[in-house]
Amino acid sequence: MAANRVVVLESVEEKLHEGWALCFEWCRYEYTDGTSHRGYRFIWKRPNGHYQPARGQARLPSVAIAVKLIGKAEAAGWGKHVGEMDAYGVVE
């Protein structure tokens, strides 16, 4: 089931190369059948501040950058949220 719309609830970013920023976000994924799920994503922003559309996942340059962004989310108070557990293989 592909999300019809992604609503960003919280976001942190790390500026990297030539103004590009890697973002870590807490989102609500809204589906065409009226259901929604919350979860995290990594996504790139262009130097002009617009998201980089991608058909796949965001390429992460290192685990250290991912850990840094997750740490920023935790410091901001939203990095320990847990999205709905569902049929996508998510278990506690």
Image (cartoon, helix red, strand yellow):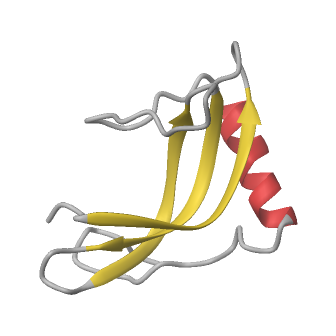
In-image side of 77 versus 92 (left or right): right
Picture layout, residue 10 above or below residue 23: below
Picture layout, residue 88 above or below residue 49: below
Task: Locate residue 31, reporting x and y percent.
Answer: 21, 74
Task: Locate residue 55, reporting x and y percent.
Answer: 25, 35
Q: Residue at x 24, y 64 (%)?
A: 3
Which quarter shows the N terminus?
Answer: bottom left
Give the residue at the far top of this rendering: 18
In-image side of 65 versus 8 (left or right): right
Quarter of the figure with residue 35: bottom left
Q: Residue at x 22, y 65 (%)?
A: 4
Q: Residue at x 37, y 38 (%)?
A: 57
Task: Locate residue 11, reporting x and y percent.
Answer: 66, 58
In this rendered view, identify the residue nearer to me: 20 or 78. Answer: 20
Task: Locate residue 5, reporting x and y percent.
Answer: 30, 65
In this rendered view, identify the residue nearer to me: 50 or 29. Answer: 50
